[in-house]
Amino acid sequence: MNLPDWLYAFASVLAGVALLFLTWKKRQQGVRESYYNLFGKIVIALFMIAFGALLFKVGKA
């Protein structure tokens, strides 16, 4: 089964945004975590969003 690249791109961007949103909601509720975990989550979410944007660009070419 071949899925188009834009579907993977959308899923990657959505997962990155969801990770950032859930991390923000967790901090808003007062649940604290170490700064290493927080930094790692933010870096991974940004990489996921960037990968999705790159896949959108490549998929349209």
Image (cartoon, rainbow, N blue to C red):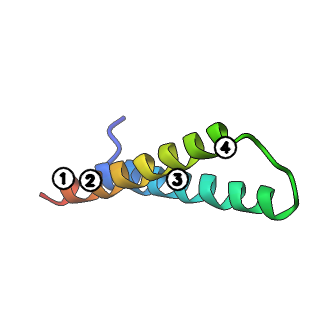
Which residue is drawn at the image coordinates 62% and 52% (left, top)?
19
Of tags 4 and 3, the one toward the viewer is: 4
The residue shown at (31%, 49%) is 4
Q: Is residue 13 above or below residue 33?
A: below
Three-letter residue code for mark 2:
Leu
| C-alpha separation, residue under disc 2 versus residue under disc 1 | 6 Å
Q: Earlier in the sequence, mark 4 or mark 3?
A: 3
- Rendering coords of residue 49 (x, y %): 42, 55
Q: Which residue is mark 1?
A: 58
Q: Which residue is at 71% across, 56% downward?
A: 22
Marks 4 and 2, how far apart at CA: 28 Å
Q: Quadrant of residue 36?
A: top right
The residue beneath circle 4 is 35
**Horizontal and vertical percent position of residue 35:** 66, 43
Instruction: Name the mark on residue 16.
Output: 3
**Which is more foreground, mark 3 or mark 1?**
3
If the image is split into quadrants, where does the C terminus sit? Answer: bottom left
Q: Where residue 10 appears, x then y in whole percent? A: 43, 57
Q: CA distance from mark 4 to mark 3?
A: 19 Å
Residue furthest to the right in view is: 30
Residue type at mark 3? Gly
User: Mark 2 near mark 1, Cβ–Cβ under 8 Å?
Assistant: yes
Circle 3 residues within 10 Å: few <14, some 14–19, many ≥20 = many
Q: Is residue 16 left or right of residue 29?
A: left
Labels 3 and 2 touching (C-beta < 8 A): no
Q: Which residue is mark 2?
A: 54
Q: Mark 4 Cα within 10 Å, few/some/many (few <14, many 20+)?
A: few
Q: Secondary structure at mark 3?
A: helix
Q: Dot 2: within a 10 Å radius of its alpha carbon, few (fewer than 14), some, or many (20 or more) residues?
A: few
